[in-house]
Image (cartoon, rainbow, N blue to C red):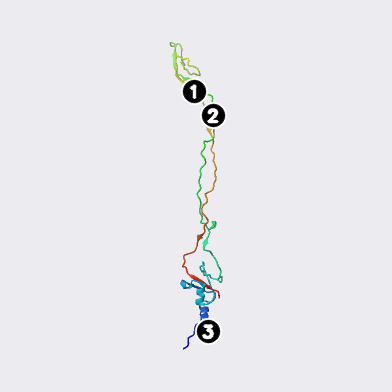
Amino acid sequence: MSKFSADEIKVNNKDIKTVMLDFCYPIGSYFITENKSFNTVAKVAAHFGGTWEKVTDRMLYAVSNDDVGVNDGSNTRTLSEANLPSHNHGFSGTTGSSAPENLTFSGVGVSGWFYIAKAGHWSNGGNAEGVFSRQEWGTGNNSGGSNPGTRINFNYTPSGAVYGGAHTHSFSGTTDNTGSATAINIVPANRHVYMYYRIG
């Protein structure tokens, strides 16, 4: 019984190996494996035949239309302001401390005395009577009298300060910058494999 190699078996003038390759991996197909015996394009081509290219740093994305064979996306992304959630930054400050504006004044001193006299009645034995009182104001000494009452001395010199009215102090500023615009890794959880794409 004769034995034939795979290269000697023909189907439509194609050896059986090429027929199987075209059937299992037609041009445009991917071969994916974790077998380290297929860690190079040369080893894949030697095993299957055909022409292959190695795919690296890419994940497959299934589309619902005919837009296939397009390289899209990236492994990292730098966020812009529009990508940030709505938030706020606190801001506070105080004005400088200083004495209020004021206008000082002083006046001419005034001093003196006054009497609040006691009131009473007098008579000359029934022939005449009357009311007497004593109220004096001056800057000298009291001359005394028969009904001196109460003497009150005073001495006053006005002085002080008039402070400025209600007012405000305005201030402005900016919050400190933060962040470094470092790109974030957006690659989802994955499993590492060898991937080859047949081109011929």
Secondary structure of the residue carrying tag 1 is strand
**Crowd around label 3: few <14 · some 14–19 · many ≥20 (10 Å):** few
The answer for how far apart the CA atoms under marks 2 and 1 are is: 18 Å
Evaluate if marks 3 and 2 touch, with contact meaning CB atoms under 8 Å apart.
no
**Residue at screen point 54% across, 29% down:** 105
Q: Earlier in the sequence, mark 2 or mark 1?
A: 2
Q: Nearer the viewer, residue 32 or 84?
A: 32
Q: Which residue is mark 3?
A: 10
Q: Nearer the viewer, residue 32 or 110?
A: 32
Evaluate if marks 3 and 1 touch, with contact meaning CB atoms under 8 Å apart.
no
Q: Which residue is mark 2?
A: 105
**Residue at screen point 53% across, 32% down:** 162
Q: Which residue is mark 1?
A: 155
**Crowd around label 2: few <14 · some 14–19 · many ≥20 (10 Å):** few
Q: Amino acid at mark 3?
A: Lys
Residue 68, disc? none
